C-alpha cells in the first residue's frame, strides 16, 4: 500500500517495463528467501511477507498503464479484462500449486519455493518481449509530449478530477467488502452449521477447512465470470450511452448489495442457499474490476496514469481491506459482550457486523452514479489537455540568405 505511490511516480517518468521486471524479480527473490528463515527469527519472516507487497505494487500500478498505451476503447476494455482475470485465476492456482508442493515435499516451506521461479521467468520475459509503448501512443498523441511539471501538480490535478475521485472511493468500497468477506465469511458459514447442528464439534472456535476451500473456489469462479460479464456488458451498453462504464458499475454494485444481504437471511436455515447468494453477489461485485481501470484511462492523461492507478490502489487498501476485517470483527466482539454467550449469538453477532458490508457496497454504487454525472465532462477535459500537451514536430521552413534560399529545420 505504501509502496504504490512510489511506483506510480516512477512509472510516469521512467522506463516502465524495467521497473515492472525489477519489482517482480524482487518479489520472487524475497518469497524464496523467506522459505529458509528459521522459526527463531519469526519477526524476519513477517517482514519478508510484508516486502512481497513492494513487488505487488509495482505490477498493479504500472501494468494497466502499459495496456492503456497499447489499446483503446473496446479493445482496451477487453485487454484490461484479460489482465484482471489473473487475480482470481492466479489466486486459485496459487492455492492448488502451494498445497501440492507442500504435500509432495511434506514440508510447507516448499509452497514458497515454487512460485519464485515462475516469477523470475516472467520477469525475464517482460524485459525481452513486452514493448515499452510511447505514453499516449494509443490516444494518437503525435510529436513530443510535455512531461508533468511535478508530482505535486499531478496530485492536485487528480484531486480536482471528480470522476477519478468518485471511482476511487467506489473501488475502496469493493475492497472493503472483499477484504472482510475473505477473512470472515468462512467463519460465519461454519457458525451457521454449528447452529444447524450439521457438524460434530460444536465447541470449535475455528472455521472448517471445507468452508474456506468452497469459498475460495467460489471467489475464483465469480472473479472470472464477473470480469468477463463486465467487459461484455460494457461493450454492449456503450452502443446505448456514452456513460456506460460507470453506470454498469453502479447497477452491478447495487445488485450485489441485495444478494449479499440475502446471505444473512438464508444462512441460518440453508448453507446451500447462502453459497448461491455469495456466488451471485460476488459475481456482480467483481463486474467492475476492469471497468474501473478503464474509466481511469478515459479521464486521466497518459503521463499521469501510473500515479493515478497507484493512488487508487493506495486509497482502496487504506479505506478498504486494510481495516475492514478488524473493524467488523471488533463490532462482532462488542455485540457478543452485550448479551449472553451462546453458539447462536456468536453466529448472529457476526452476521449483524457483516451487514455493514452491503451498506458500504450501496455507498460504492452511489459513488459510481456520481462518477457517471461527471464522466463525460472529465473525459472531454482529458482530451483537451492531451492536445495541449503535444509539442508540434519540427517543421521545415525556408530561410533567405544573400546566397539564396536555405531549407532548414526549426
Image: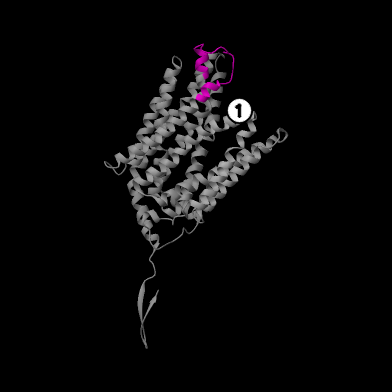
- Viewer-closest of 27 and 295: 27
Quarter of the N terminus within the rendering: top right
Viewer-proximal residue, 120 or 18?
A: 120
The residue that appears at 48% across and 32% down in the rendered structure is 178
Q: Position of residue 275 (x, y in %)?
A: 44, 22
Q: Quadrant of the C terminus?
A: bottom left
Residue 208 position (above or below residue 365): above
* Mark 1 residue element: helix
Q: Residue 116: image x %, image y %? A: 59, 41
Q: Residue at x 58, y 20 (%)?
A: 206
- Front residue of this view, candidates 268 and 131: 131
Q: Which residues are magenta?
A: 190-213
Q: Is residue 310 visible?
A: no
**On the image, numbered disc 1 is attached to which residue?**
103
Residue 373 % position (x, y)? 33, 42
Give the crowd class for mark 1: few <14, some 14-19, many >=20 residues within 10 Å.
few
Task: Pick out the residue farthest to the bottom.
Answer: 402
Amino acid at each position: 500500500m505504501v509502496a504504490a505511490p512510489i511506483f506510480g511516480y516512477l512509472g510516469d517518468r521512467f522506463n516502465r517495463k524495467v521497473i515492472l521486471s525489477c519489482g517482480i524479480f524482487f518479489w520472487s527473490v524475497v518469497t524464496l528467501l523467506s522459505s529458509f528463515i528459521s522459526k527463531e527469527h519469526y519477526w524476519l519472516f513477517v517482514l519478508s511477507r510484508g516486502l512481497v507487497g513492494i513487488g505487488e505494487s509495482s505490477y498493479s500500478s504500472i501494468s494497466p498503464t502499459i495496456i492503456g498505451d497499447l489499446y483503446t476503447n473496446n479493445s482496451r476494455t477487453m485487454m484490461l479484462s484479460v489482465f484482471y482475470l489473473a487475480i482470481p485465476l492466479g489466486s486459485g492456482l496459487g492455492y492448488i500449486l502451494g498445497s501440492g508442493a507442500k504435500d509432495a515435499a511434506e514440508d510447507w516451506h516448499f509452497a514458497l519455493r515454487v512460485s519464485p521461479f515462475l516469477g523470475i521467468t516472467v520477469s525475464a520475459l517482460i524485459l525481452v518481449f513486452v514493448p515499452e509503448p510511447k505514453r499516449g501512443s494509443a490516444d494518437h498523441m503525435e510529436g513530443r509530449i510535455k512531461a508533468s511539471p511535478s508530482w505535486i501538480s499531478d496530485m492536485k490535478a487528480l484531486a480536482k478530477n471528480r470522476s477519478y475521485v468518485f471511482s476511487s472511493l467506489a473501488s475502496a468500497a469493493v475492497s472493503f467488502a472483499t477484504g472482510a468477506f475473505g477473512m470472515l465469511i468462512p467463519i460465519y458459514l461454519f457458525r451457521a452449521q454449528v447452529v444447524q447442528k450439521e457438524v460434530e464439534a460444536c465447541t470449535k472456535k475455528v472455521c472448517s477447512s471445507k468452508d474456506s476451500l468452497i469459498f475460495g473456489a467460489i471467489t475464483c469462479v465469480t472473479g472470472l465470470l464477473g470480469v468477463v460479464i463486465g467487459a461484455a456488458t460494457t461493450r454492449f451498453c456503450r452502443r446505448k450511452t456514452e456513460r456506460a462504464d460507470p453506470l454498469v458499475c453502479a447497477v452491478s454494485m447495487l445488485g450485489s448489495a441485495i444478494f449479499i444481504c440475502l446471505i444473512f437471511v438464508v444462512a441460518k436455515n440453508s448453507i446451500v442457499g447462502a453459497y448461491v447468494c455469495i456466488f451471485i453477489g460476488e459475481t456482480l461485485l467483481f463486474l467492475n474490476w476492469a471497468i474501473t481501470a478503464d474509466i481511469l484511462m478515459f479521464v486521466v492523461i497518459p503521463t499521469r496514469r501510473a500515479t493515478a492507478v497507484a493512488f487508487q490502489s493506495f486509497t482502496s487498501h487504506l479505506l478498504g481491506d486494510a481495516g475492514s476485517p478488524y473493524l467488523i470483527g471488533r463490532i462482532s466482539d462488542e455485540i457478543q459482550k452485550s448479551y449472553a454467550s451462546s453458539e447462536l449469538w456468536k453466529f448472529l453477532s457476526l452476521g449483524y457486523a457483516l451487514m455493514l458490508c452491503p451498506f458500504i457496497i450501496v455507498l460504492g454504487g452511489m459513488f459510481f452514479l456520481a462518477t457517471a454525472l461527471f464522466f463525460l465532462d472529465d473525459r472531454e477535459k482529458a482530451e483537451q489537455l492531451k492536445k495541449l500537451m503535444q509539442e508540434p514536430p519540427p517543421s521545415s521552413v525556408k530561410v533567405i540568405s544573400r546566397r539564396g534560399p536555405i531549407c532548414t529545420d526549426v
